[in-house]
Amino acid sequence: MNGIRRISKKRLLALTGTSWLFDALDVGILSFIIAALEKDWHLSAEQMGWIGSVNSIGMAIGAFVFGALADRFGRKQIFLWTLLFFSVGSGLSAFSQSFIVFIIFRLIVGMGLGGELPVASTLVSESVEVKDRGRIVVLLESFWAVGWILSALIAYFIIPKFGWQIALILTALPAFYTLYLRKGLPDSPQFLAKKQNRGEASIFVKIAQVWSKEFAARTCMLWILWFSVVFSYYGMFLWLPSVIAMKGFDLIHSFGYVLIMTIAQLPGYFTAAWLIEKAGRKFVLVTFLIGTAISAYWFGHAESVLMLIISGMLLSFFDLGAWGALYAYSPEQYPTAIRGTGTGMAAAFGRIGGILGPLLVGTLVARHIPTASIFTIFCLSIFVGVLFLIFLGKETKAGKLSEEY
């Protein structure tokens, strides 16, 4: 490992977490923009669903392609490219004059977002000690909550007065952040050491290894888990402001309620970060996913403002805590040589759920299916992921599973 530059945990967390914040800002803004575009462009429910789904199509492509490239060219280099990719695409989408042009740019944005998230979590996971790994990755995910809170603030104060275009222009600012990261962030020590010690297998060989006999069971579990989590998250959260509006509240009030719910994400992350090294990844994932399922069911059936806000806050608390644990758990399923590929492929398969979730909501809303029934579907999908995790998932706390970690 001679000549490999290292970085303190706090600085690593700050540098990568800031980019994670920008990711969340973009995804969060999209949920509010969908509601605003419905009024500006008179979109149908199906068209609203397609905006979220096209974003997820791009994320599926990005997770698969950039995850594999990260094993070939390094975590840092691909991390910077994905950040630049989604920043430029998001800024350009602000100038869209039609629905078709807008979703084309959202496809580009999605590719950058989908690639950055698994690559960034792999980079952080490989750059810290075993005893701190789970906690640091969950804390990295906590920056997602900050990004969502900022997006809710922008939606509440900027969109009604200045329009959704200004909000999207603000999400293009991370492009300048890549210039700073280029010098301030070192690559993964484990990746650099592996690159020095042996030649690189082709991407196709790595893909085959992910589904080899040794890793097939955990890969199957991880893919189903990612699908159920992403399907429910994007189906629920991208529609959150719109669903609240459907329950009879005006758009401004729905933005305000989502802001309150979003704040609950932070204690969810911090609780998961505290538990993950004490109770283990699997325990935290199972517990928080069950909490998510119950909260989703309650939110779908909530009618009063109080019940809506409480169930929405619990949904944010448990769902985002589960996301943090998932990003800690996923890279630990594979050794260094195929970690980016394996994590990226799982995330890519999960993004198929992100495509179907928003489309499903749009289709069911157009057919006047009650929101209670829609959220019950997401509740059940989460329980499917929990069952696969319980029966096929193994604990990876302190490197118990992947020997090379």
Image: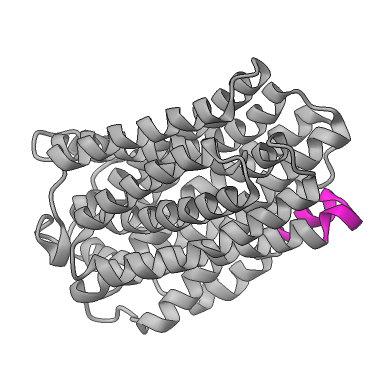
The picture places residue 272, in percent across and down from the top left corner, at 33, 64
Q: Is 316 placed above or below 143 here?
A: above
Q: Is 25 placed above or below 342 here?
A: below
- Left or right of 81 on screen, residue 4: left
Q: What span is colored magenta in the figure?
A: 158-171
- Left or right of 18 on screen, residue 376: left
Residue at coordinates 58% horizontally, 25% vertically from top-left? Answer: 359
Q: Quadrant of residue 117?
A: bottom left
Tell me if residue 169 is in the magenta stretch.
yes
155 vs 300, nearest the viewer: 300
The picture places residue 242, in percent across and down from the top left corner, at 69, 38
- Left or right of 255 on screen, residue 264: left
Q: Principal SS element in the magenta part?
A: helix
Q: Is 364 placed above or below 314 here?
A: above
Tell me if residue 215 is in the magenta stretch.
no
The picture places residue 345, in percent across and down from the top left corner, at 34, 39
The picture places residue 52, in percent across and down from the top left corner, at 61, 35
Question: In the rendered image, is residue 26 in sight?
Answer: no
Question: In the rendered image, is residue 83 in sight?
Answer: yes
Q: Quadrant of residue 210?
A: top left
275 vs 335, nearest the viewer: 275
292 vs 192, nearest the viewer: 292
Please state, as top left, top right, bottom left or bottom right, where the C terminus lies in the image.
bottom left
